[in-house]
Amino acid sequence: MPISVEDSQSKLKPTKLGFGMIILILSWYGMEAVHELGHVVHALASGGIVNSVSIPLWGISCTHINPNPYAAFVVWGGPIWGSLIPITMWLVVKKYFRQPLLMNVVAFFAGFCCIANGAYLGIGWMDRAGDAGDLMREGVSVGWLIGFGVIACVSGLTIWHLWTNELRKKSVGQAVTDEV
């Protein structure tokens, strides 16, 4: 028996909404942390010196590097590792840890990070904001920013699609099991 829209809407309780908001907020700070970690890794790999990393309660995170001998390389590190680390976490949890809550949280986080980093570069070039602006000042073509944005956003949406398909299968399987 398929699950109706009424059934799915009636299951949204204040505790689920609160839990969802907490996951969203933690995902934002987690995304900023892995993004800035990417800048730090690339800075250290290129001989730069990391002066500070800031992840403020309100506002956008920032990594200060001086000297920064390969600025474009360092800037690319944020969105690249900010997407690849969560994807790797998702794949590891999916393969080795079958705990449903952990799998759901990590799947959401991985998709969120990919979409956030993809949108950051993919549309950030219009305002020359943040990393997109830094990359443009370093001579990186807008096409590369858009290309990365599309790939990262599609990756995030694909993760969410696969994750929700798994949830749907389990939900339908549970409904069938309950009827028997």
Image (cartoon, grey):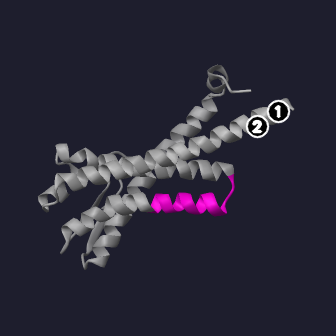
The verdict on residue 94 being magenta is: yes
Q: How many labels were placed on the picture?
A: 2
| Amino acid type at image mark 1 | Asp
User: Callout 1: few (<14), some (14-19), or many (20+) C-alpha neighbours within 10 Å?
Assistant: few
Instruction: Residue type at mark 2: give it.
Output: Gln
> Which residue shows up at 30% across the image and 54% down it?
148
Residue located beneath label 2 in the image = 174
Residue 44's image quarter?
bottom left
Tell whether 175 sits left or right of 144: right
Residue 166 sits in which quadrant? top right
Q: Nearer the viewer, residue 94 or 176?
A: 176
- Tag 1 near tag 2, CB within 8 Å: yes
Look at the picture and state if 87 lies above or below 20.
Answer: below
Mark number displayed over residue 178: 1
SS label for mark 1: helix
Q: Secondary structure at mark 2?
A: helix
Residue in the picture at 31% in, 71% down? 42
The x and y percentages for residue 121 are 27, 50
Farthest residue toward the front? 1
Q: In terms of depth relative to the viewer, which is nearer, 104 or 50?
A: 104
Span shown in magenta: 85-99
Mark 2: give few (<14), some (14-19) or many (20+) Cα within 10 Å: few
Residue 131 visible in the shown view = no
| Quadrant (top left, top right, bottom left, bottom right) of the C terminus | top right
